Image (tube, grey):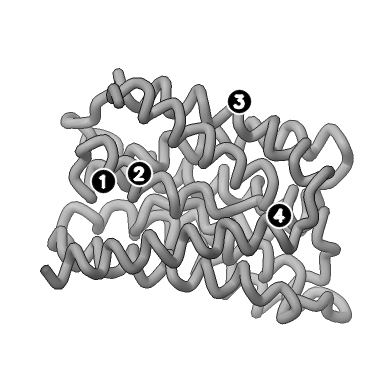
Amino acid sequence: MSTLLLALVAGTVIGLALGALGGGGGVLAVPALVYLLGFSTASATTAGLVIVTATSATALYAHARDGHVAWKAGLLLSAAGVLPAFLAGALTDHVPEAALTAAFAMIAALAALRMLRPSATEPTEGVRPVRAAGTGAGLGAVTGFLGVGGGFLAVPALVGVLGLRMRQAVGTSLLVITVNSLAALVARSGTGDDLRWEVIAPFAGAAILGAWDGKRLAAKVAGATLRRVFAYVLFTVAAFMIIDVVV
């Protein structure tokens, strides 16, 4: 299969995840860039931020148009996450490749567990500012360090910490992802000289189109079914990456 076709297929899958679930796309994007398209882990995390930023912004527009974005709640988490995302993004070049891969595998496994346990995200009574700020800072750090949007953590946080309903949490998470990813990209500016834009551009384009389809898919397929499918894919990715580090 040609590199271009692989990029298009992978981008479509990432877009579907972001559009349907409000997260999960970035966790799939980096392994796809590494194992299917030959990027180093460090370059893949930067490329992943480019792809996730473009895709999340597109999906955010679609959800906002339907009134499914809680702007105040999303901006609260985003504001808390900007500085950690920037600082963590600047640190990535100083982390060994094996350590970065292992950390990413752990995050992928955590994302899968989150997707398989939606019952743990019941709405709370009111907003807890301190918890919200801490959650936002943690999401920003994960985004900056590993090049993922953090939506798989943002959605449960928006439901459990800020008391949003699931559909609104999915839309709002895209705002958090977009802001954090932009901050991390700014921190990494000038470090992506080896990025292959001839691969990233079609990958991002397919992801953007996939995000629109993902939003429509979410309206037709039960959310629990979508989460299970992506969770099993993420478990497989995590296991593969751990084996790669060990072997």
Q: Nearer the viewer, mark 1 or mark 3?
A: 1
| Residue type pointed to by label 1 | Tyr
Q: Which residue is mark 4?
A: 74
Amino acid at pointer 3:
Leu
C-alpha separation, residue under disc 4 versus residue under disc 1: 33 Å
Disc 4 + disc 2, Cβ < 8 Å? no
* Numbered disc 3: secondary structure: helix
Describe the element under mark 2 as helix, strand or loop. helix
Tags 2 and 1 touching, CB below 8 Å:
yes
Q: Gap between marks 1 and 3, in whole Å?
A: 23 Å
- Foreground residue among 172 and 87: 172
**Which quarter of the rendering shows the C terminus?**
bottom left
Q: What numbered label is drawn on residue 209?
A: 3
Q: Earlier in the sequence, mark 3 or mark 4?
A: 4
| Residue 97 visible (yes or no) | yes
Q: Are marks 1 and 3 in contact (CB under 8 Å)?
A: no
Question: Is the residue marked by circle 4 packed among few (<14), some (14-19), or many (20+) residues within 10 Å?
Answer: many
Q: Label 1 neighbourhood size at 10 Å, few (<14), some (14-19), many (20+)?
A: some
Q: Secondary structure at mark 4?
A: helix
Query: Do we see residue 141 in this rendering?
Result: no
Which kind of residue does numbered mark 4 sit on? Gly
Neighbor class of circle 2 (other Cα within 10 Å; few <14, some 14-19, many 20+) is many
Residue 35: image tag: 1
**Nearest to viewer (mark 3 / mark 4):** 3
Which residue corresponds to the image point at 82% horizontal and 65% vertical from the top-left? 164
